[in-house]
Image (spheres, rainbow, N blue to C red):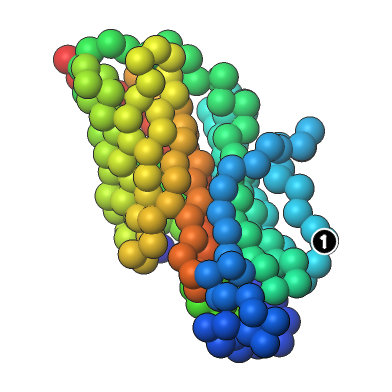
């Protein structure tokens, strides 16, 4: 697992409630966002903004994007799928086993620092195409999802350092992608997964 810390400027210490009446849990947020023509999430060009994309997929057209952005006192974590239509052809039976890699950008505690850490890791993921279940756990990241009745999309949840997040992705017999983001009152994270595998009867 690789860890890289990016300095976002001077340290900022926040109490549970500021003099203006803004609570700490109003200072963090997460969600999904659209991507621009370059396949990135637009964030303000200020110190503390960190964005990234997935490694090039085998055919170069499917992956994820993520961004952690600071604007004033507020910190946001955003994620997106990039050209997910590149993954098509969902099996209806069998189990898929995938070797996936992930990238995460996070701020662990906004009360003490706005430094953004970037972490990479790997996790095995299994997909039961019969009941549409997606599940994986590795290097501290847990993913759990449910496929839609039709198509190759799935939605679900992630857990990273005890903080839950939202997950969406696509999967077929040999490829899987996902994008996720989450937040607590004092932390944010966003990232994505990409991997390849095979299906067994």
Q: Would residue 43 be found to the left or right of residue 13 on screen?
A: right
Does residue 30 appear in this view?
Answer: yes
* Residue extending farthest right: 45
Q: Would residue 27 be found to the left or right of residue 135 on screen?
A: right
* Residue extending farthest front: 21
Identity of the residue drawn at 41% across and 33% down: 155
Q: Position of residue 191 (x, y in %)?
A: 52, 51
Foreground pick, 15 / 166: 15
Q: Quadrant of residue 140?
A: bottom left
Does residue 103 appear in this view?
Answer: no
Q: Position of residue 106 (x, y in %)?
A: 53, 65
Identity of the residue drawn at 27% across and 39% down: 135
Foreground pick, 132 / 197: 132
Foreground pick, 26 / 194: 26
Image quarter in which the N terminus is found: bottom left
Identity of the residue drawn at 31% across and 51% down: 142
Q: Is residue 83 above or below residue 192?
A: above
Q: Position of residue 65 (x, y in %)?
A: 61, 44
Which residue in the structure is indicated by mark 1? 45
Does dot 1 land on a helix, a strand or a loop? loop
């Amino acid at each position: 697992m690789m860890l890289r810390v990016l300095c976002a400027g001077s340290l900022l210490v926040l109490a549970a409630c500021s003099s203006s009446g803004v609570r700490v849990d109003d200072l963090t947020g997460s969600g999904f966002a659209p991507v621009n023509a370059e396949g990135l999430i637009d964030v303000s060009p200020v110190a503390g903004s960190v964005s990234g994309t997935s490694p090039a997929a085998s055919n170069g057209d499917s992956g994820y994007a993520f961004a952690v952005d600071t604007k004033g006192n507020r910190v946001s974590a955003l994620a997106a799928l990039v050209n997910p239509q590149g993954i098509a052809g969902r099996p209806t039976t069998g189990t898929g086993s995938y070797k996936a890699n992930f990238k995460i950008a996070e701020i662990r505690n906004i009360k003490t620092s706005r430094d953004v850490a970037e972490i990479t890791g790997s996790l095995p993921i299994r997909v039961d195409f019969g009941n549409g279940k997606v599940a994986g756990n590795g290097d501290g990241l847990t993913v759990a999802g449910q496929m839609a009745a039709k198509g190759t999309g799935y939605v679900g949840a992630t857990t990273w350092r005890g903080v839950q997040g939202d997950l969406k992705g696509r999967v077929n017999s040999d490829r899987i992608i996902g994008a996720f983001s989450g937040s607590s009152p004092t932390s944010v994270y966003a990232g994505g997964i990409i991997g390849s595998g095979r299906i067994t009867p």
